[in-house]
């Protein structure tokens, strides 16, 4: 837990609706310091959970060989209160800026929807019509994200929180690091609710078979991760399953969870159980069908 309180601040701002953000310098690198939103429906719920999700989600992507933003957990003292925060390394530079997929999608004149439309057919059509990145690399990247997001239960991978690094001098684009995993791993439940979920097979199953759903739409509806992946309907998704699932090491992930100070003992038990279930029921079963 790093104390970010007295580190140098920079004037750079960051958009996004999920919490306040500061720009700081840590170890000679620029970081976005992210403060999670309060839960207005449940004031007693710890507001650190999205920090935990951001940290774990990005680390799991990196463990699976998919380049993700570097994240650090720490504290920030403000107005006499100690806030738990997550620091996300800024992957832009003086020569490169981040361009989200929605902005690239907006370049497609005859697109069936605007840049933020997430219907899967429209996204895949955009891959073929755009001219900024190899379409094959884009398909692999999308389905890699989809499979890992299914594993960590991320409901918020829309067209605004993944994209590209644009080099203005060279007029070149490359796929940017994965970021924004703060909505994964069920950040809006407290220990009292976790006790109820863990003690009920139906509640645990619901968080594998039913929720969360993907921000990507399939025939106008948010994609059910279990149904989409185990259907084997999308060949590029099947390829991603074969690439990623054998790399998932639950022992390594459990060790990562155990080492996190922010998580309560009950949270750690829940996270390890739900990840094991999502791997076995969604991903392993799909891989078995493909084999």
Image (cartoon, rainbow, N blue to C red):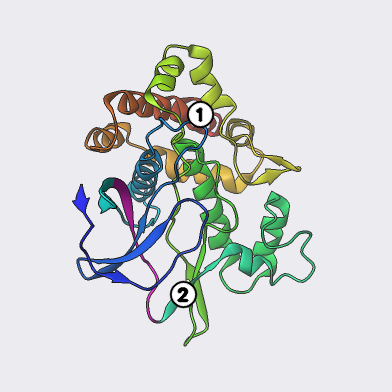
Image quadrant in which you'd find residue 224: top right
> Which residue shows up at 36% across the image and 62% down it?
22
Q: In the rendered structure, which disc, 1 or 2, sits on the residue that comes first in sequence?
A: 2
Q: Is residue 27 visible?
A: yes
Please name which of the two marks, 1 or 2, marks the residue nearer to the observer.
2
What is the residue that sits farthest to the bottom in this orientation?
169
> Which residue shows up at 43% across the image and 43% down it?
244
Tell me the CA gap for discs 1 and 2: 41 Å
Find residue 288 and name its label: 1
> Which residue shows up at 37% across the image and 76% down it?
93
| Magenta part of the chain | 83-94
Please say if 91 is above or below 188.
below
Residue located beneath label 2 in the image: 97
Residue 234 percent coordinates (x, y): 64, 43
Q: Nearer the viewer, residue 198 or 86?
A: 86
Q: Crowdedness of circle 1 by 10 Å Cα count: few (<14), some, many (20+)?
A: few
Q: Nearer the viewer, residue 144 or 256?
A: 256
Describe the element under mark 2 as helix, strand or loop. Answer: strand
Image quadrant in which you'd find residue 259: top left
Describe the element under mark 1 as helix, strand or loop. Answer: helix
Residue 20 percent coordinates (x, y): 43, 55
């Amino acid at each position: 837990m790093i104390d970010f309180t007295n580190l140098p601040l920079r004037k750079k701002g960051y958009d996004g609706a999920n919490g306040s953000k500061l720009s700081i310098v840590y170890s000679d690198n620029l970081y976005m310091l992210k403060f999670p939103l309060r839960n207005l429906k449940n004031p007693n719920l710890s507001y650190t959970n999205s920090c935990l999700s951001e940290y774990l989600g990005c680390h799991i992507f990196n463990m699976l060989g998919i380049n993700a933003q570097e994240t650090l957990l720490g504290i920030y003292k403000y107005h006499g209160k100690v806030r738990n925060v997550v620091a996300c390394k800024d992957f832009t530079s003086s020569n490169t800026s981040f361009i989200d997929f929605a902005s690239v999608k907006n370049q497609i004149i005859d697109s069936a929807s605007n840049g933020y439309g997430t219907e899967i057919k429209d996204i895949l059509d955009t891959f073929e019509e755009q001219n900024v990145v190899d379409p094959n690399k884009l398909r692999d990247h999308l389905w890699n994200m989809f499979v890992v997001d299914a594993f960590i239960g991320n409901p918020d991978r829309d067209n605004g929180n993944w994209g590209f690094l644009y080099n203005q001098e060279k007029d070149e684009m490359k796929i940017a690091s994965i970021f924004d995993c703060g909505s994964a791993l069920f950040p809006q439940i407290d220990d009292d609710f976790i006790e109820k979920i863990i003690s009920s097979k139906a509640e645990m199953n619901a968080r594998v078979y039913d929720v969360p759903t993907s921000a990507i739409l399939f025939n106008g509806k948010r994609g059910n991760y279990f149904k989409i992946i185990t259907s084997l309907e999308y060949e590029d998704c099947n390829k991603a399953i074969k690439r990623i699932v054998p790399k998932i090491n639950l022992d390594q992930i459990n060790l990562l969870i155990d080492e996190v100070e922010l998580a309560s003992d009950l949270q750690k038990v829940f996270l390890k159980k739900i990840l094991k279930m999502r791997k076995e029921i969604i991903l392993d079963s799909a891989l078995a069908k493909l084999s």
